[in-house]
Amino acid sequence: MKYTLLLLLAAACLNATAQRPVLTTDETIPIPPIKFNVDGTLAIKASAASSPDDFNFLVGKWKMHHRRLNRRLEGCKDWTEFNSEDENVKILSGNADMDTYRTTEMPGMEGRLFEGLTLRLFDPQTKLWSLYWVASNRGVLDPPMVGSFDNGVGHFFAKDTYNNKPVIVVFRWDVRDKEHPIWSQAFSPDNGRTWEWNWYNVSVRVP
């Protein structure tokens, strides 16, 4: 009986490990090439399938597990993992959604509550999404991440600065498994020639 219980526990552990998404970059998914308008702004075109329903999968409550690079654009290989929670709702007659993010495990916050808010707006003319983020420890809207989904994967781009140096930022939403969506972030210091992935998270729905 004891031997049988051990086998069942081992099988359960192996099954959980097999189902848990690995928080590393899926190299089979390329980052779309960066293009620029004549004025230097990013030239971003929506996919043919882009829709105001693209973020419907996020509606509800989630637990999130994060893996974040400790230092960016310094060749760092050390990562910190932590947890958070998130709640998402549709707004503006279905052309937008908003979520609130909470954690007391954010690195560098010494256990204090960290909150964030994301507002996602769908433009029916361009069919592009614009994603706006604001964090409680800054109170400033980051530049919007603009893009769309194609075949269950969304890429969203913005020009920004990091440590006073210009970078291009990409968000990737991999929602091929809508019950375990994976978000990731990368920076490019050279206009998209090279990228460093610096943050991943996977979400699990809360009943």
Image (cartoon, helix red, strand yellow):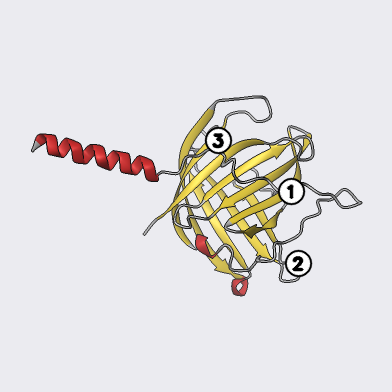
- Mark 1: secondary structure: strand
Quarter of the picture holding the C terminus: bottom left
Q: Nearer the viewer, residue 55 or 82?
A: 55
The residue shown at (53%, 30%) is: 79
Q: Which residue is mark 2?
A: 126
Left or right of 183? Residue 72 is right
Q: Quadrant of residue 161?
A: top right
- Between disc 2 and disc 1, the foreground one is 2
Tell me residue 36's x, y (percent): 84, 49
Q: Nearer the viewer, residue 65 or 150?
A: 150
| Residue type at the position of mark 2 | Thr
Image height check: is 134 above or below 161?
A: below
User: Residue 23 shows which numbered tag?
Assistant: none
Image height check: is 2 above or below 115?
A: above
Q: Quadrant of residue 137?
A: top right
Q: Which residue is mark 3?
A: 68
Tell me residue 89's x, y (percent): 52, 64
- Mark 3: secondary structure: strand
| Residue type at the position of mark 1 | Ala
The residue shown at (22%, 39%) is: 9
| Residue type at the position of mark 3 | Arg
Quarter of the picture holding the N terminus: top left
